[in-house]
Image: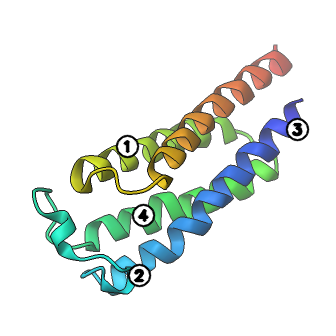
Amino acid sequence: MKKHLYLILGLLQVFVAIGALPAGYAMITDPTGISLGMTTNMLAGSHFQNFLVPGIFLFTVNGLFHLLAGILSIMKKKFTWLFGIALGFALMVWITVQVLSVNMSSFLQPLFFIIGIIEIILGLMIRKQELKISA
């Protein structure tokens, strides 16, 4: 069971990264959002004037960090559980801020929020397994 938890967590993390890296890159290189079919009007009432800062967060945390964590999870490295919990929480915060900033606009928002919850649960399950083994 333990090996499957690492694999499932790793695949979820890579899945998040695959979506976040190109979208984050597009937001960084075109902060107007036009290349993604968005406009800065979507950000009216938020703390952001363009998509640069959200793009940097998306590319780095939900992209690069999730990719690295996914690789480490698949390799069954120590402290994978910690990355699962931290990045699951970060993903949930990202989605919450997104919904508060631009409203609920896609089925992907609740999907990725649920993925964040699953990352946390898998991280806790892996930690529990690791504690049993070391005891």
Residue shown at 85%/20% (left/top)?
133
Q: CA distance from mark 1 to mark 4?
A: 11 Å
Q: Number of callouts in the render?
A: 4
Q: CA distance from mark 2 to mark 1?
A: 21 Å
Residue underneath mark 4: 58
Looking at the image, is mark 2 or mark 1 earlier in the sequence?
Answer: 2
User: Around disc 4, counting alpha carbons within 10 Å, would you say few (fewer than 14), some (14 to 19), or many (20 or more)?
Assistant: many
Looking at the image, is mark 1 or mark 4 earlier in the sequence?
Answer: 4
Image quadrant in which you'd find residue 80: top right
**Kind of residue at disc 1:** Val
Residue 46 left/right relative to 112? left
Residue 97 left/right relative to 4? left
Residue underneath mark 2: 26
Q: Position of residue 9 (x, y in %)?
A: 71, 44
**Kind of residue at disc 4:** Leu
User: Which circle marks residue 93 in the picture?
Assistant: 1
